Image (tube, rainbow, N blue to C red):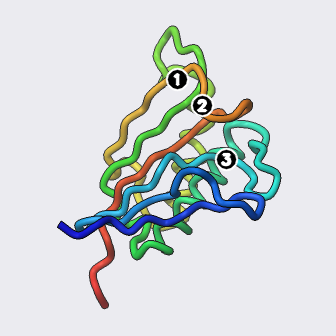
């Protein structure tokens, strides 16, 4: 088995204590990607802006690691909140889903084609974070 190649994460000019992702055995594994401004280390305001920023980071990271949005095989969404009626019934989810769907359609992908998990949580890594998205993708075929 080949040792995974990891990709360090830098925010505000300093290396974080976790990697942004790894490539192993033909797959790319992205750590939870969030809507944090990389210079200020503060979450951008609102679920919509955080979702958009996280997805833009995911796109860039996949491309850096030899993959693309078109090669995603699994996504996991972690959303902060109290969801007594379930996450899908919540306004927060609806606002996130609108941005997610727009983003993927802008990139030529039907969002309903991507297998995903949706998990409600009470907190994420930093105060103010509302969403974090983990991704597994395959590597692009050599051209």
Mark 1 or 2, which is nearer the eye?
2
Element assignment for label 2: loop
Q: How far is mark 1 from mark 2, CA to CA?
A: 7 Å
The image position of residue 49, as x and y in percent, is 71, 46
Total numbered circles? 3
Q: Earlier in the sequence, mark 3 or mark 1?
A: 3
> Mark number for residue 17?
none
Left or right side of 19 for 71: left
Mark 2 or 3, which is nearer the eye?
2
Element assignment for label 3: loop
Label 3: how many Cα within 10 Å (few below 14, some 14–19, many 20+): many
Q: Do the residues labelled 1 and 2 touch (CB within 8 Å)?
A: yes
Q: Quadrant where the N terminus lies?
A: bottom left
Q: Is residue 71 above or below residue 134?
A: below
- Residue labelled with disc 3: 35
Element assignment for label 1: strand
Residue at 44% x, 28% y: name it: 119
The image position of residue 24, as x and y in percent, is 29, 65
Q: Which of marks 2 and 3 is nearer the N terminus?
A: 3
Label 1: how many Cα within 10 Å (few below 14, some 14–19, many 20+): some
- Residue labelled with disc 1: 121
Q: How far is mark 2 from mark 3, CA to CA?
A: 11 Å
> Which of the two residues, 86 or 106, is positioned nearer the viewer here?
86
- Residue labelled with disc 2: 124
Left or right side of 10 for 76: left
Residue at 57% x, 55% y: name it: 55
């Amino acid at each position: 088995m080949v040792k995974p190649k990891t990709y360090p994460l830098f925010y505000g000019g300093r290396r974080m204590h976790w990697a942004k992702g790894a490539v192993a055995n033909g797959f790319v594994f992205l750590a939870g990607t969030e809507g944090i401004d990389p210079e200020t280390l503060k979450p951008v305001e609102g679920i919509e802006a955080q979702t958009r920023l996280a997805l833009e980071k995911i796109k860039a990271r996949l491309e850096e690691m030899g993959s693309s949005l078109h090669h995603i095989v699994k996504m996991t969404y972690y959303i902060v909140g109290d969801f007594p009626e379930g996450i899908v019934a919540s306004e927060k989810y609806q606002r996130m889903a609108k941005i997610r769907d727009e983003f993927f359609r802008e990139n030529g992908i039907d969002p309903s084609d991507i297998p995903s998990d949706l998990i409600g949580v009470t907190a994420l890594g930093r105060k103010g974070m509302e969403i974090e998205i983990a991704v597994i993708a395959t590597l692009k075929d050599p051209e």
